[in-house]
């Protein structure tokens, strides 16, 4: 029987979070690293929207990163990223992820590529991003991670985007008024799990 196949792109924050959930759940998969400029025809035939990640399991196609994470955690959630939380906590985690995906990500892209969005300055876009950073900072003033003292789905789903934010202007981020968010990001970047899923090995089998 063939292993599930993940179409992925190494640096994509959505693909990073999907790979982290799959690996942490100890699910064996094959990874196909794609070029976003030349997406494989087989992937587009399975999912015409043309975004990564896409997971193919037998005749099932999962083409949303959050759905891939939930699929993996539903099979195995050894570190209690999701299963152990109450319904209210799960809904709070989803709310944070939605704010990340639907609001922050849009401002992040404009902050990253401010030259392509000359209507406003890069500082303006950064300030828009800071609204979400403040939400994270407030949560992280209360606990080490977004949902408490241990890593949850919300941390893993969100931090790859904050990583991108931090990289736009490292000097600014290193002295920004969000110290808890900075330490939180650093602790997640230090995870062996993160290092593993970022390994530059095309077609790695994890
Ligand atoms: N909502 C999707 C978004 C995935 C997404 O937008 N991925 C980007 C890469 S980071 C992509 O594939 N973009 C298509 C392109 O660049 O052509 C998910 O969560 O999986």
Image (cartoon, rainbow, N blue to C red):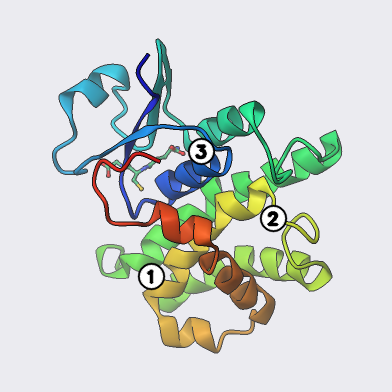
Against 179, residue 77 (above or below) is: above
Above or below, 3 against 122 in this view is: above
Q: Is mark 1 within 8 Å of ligand 1?
A: no
**Of residues 65 and 97, which is closer to you in this image?**
65
Point out the frontmost of discs 3 and 1: 3
Q: Is residue 117 left or right of residue 161?
A: left
Q: Position of residue 42 (x, y in %)?
A: 21, 21
- Would you place residue 92 above or below residue 115 in this image? above
Secondary structure under badge 1? loop
Determine whether the residue tagged by mark 3 lies in a helix, strand or loop.
Answer: helix
14 or 165: nearer the eye? 14
- C-beta proximity under 8 Å, tags 2 and 1: no
Left or right? Give the position of 102 relative to 110.
right
Looking at this view, name the residue that lies furthest to the left: 38
First of labels 2, 1 by sequence position: 1
Q: Which one is in front, 79 or 186?
A: 79
Between marks 2 and 1 in the image, the one whose residue lies nearer the viewer: 2
Q: Position of residue 74 (x, y in %)?
A: 65, 28
Marks 3 and 1 in Cβ contact (< 8 Å): no
Residue on which the image places disc 1:
120
Q: Residue at x 44, y 88 (%)?
A: 171
User: Which residue in the protein does label 2 denote?
Assistant: 151
Q: Which residue is mark 3?
A: 22
Q: Secondary structure at mark 2?
A: loop
Q: Earlier in the sequence, mark 2 or mark 3?
A: 3
């Amino acid at each position: 029987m063939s292993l599930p196949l993940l179409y992925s792109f190494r640096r994509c924050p959505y693909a990073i979070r999907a790979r982290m959930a799959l690996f942490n759940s100890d699910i064996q998969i094959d990874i196909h690293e794609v070029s976003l400029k030349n997406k494989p025809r087989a992937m587009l035939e399975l999912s015409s929207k043309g975004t990564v990640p896409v997971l193919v399991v037998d005749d099932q196609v999962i083409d949303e990163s959050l759905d891939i994470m939930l699929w993996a955690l539903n099979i195995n959630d050894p570190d209690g990223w999701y299963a152990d939380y109450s319904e209210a906590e799960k809904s709070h985690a989803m709310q944070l992820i939605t704010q990340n995906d639907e609001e922050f990500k849009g401002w992040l892209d404009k902050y990253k590529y401010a030259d392509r969005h000359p209507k406003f300055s890069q500082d303006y876009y950064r300030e828009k991003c800071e609204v979400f950073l403040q939400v994270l900072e407030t949560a992280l003033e209360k606990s080490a991670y977004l949902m408490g003292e241990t890593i949850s789905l919300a941390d893993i789903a969100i931090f790859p985007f904050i990583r991108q934010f931090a990289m736009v202007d490292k000097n600014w981020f290193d002295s920004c008024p969000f110290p808890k968010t900075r330490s939180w990001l650093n602790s997640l970047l230090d995870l062996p799990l993160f290092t593993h899923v970022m390994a530059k090995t095309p077609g790695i089998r994890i």
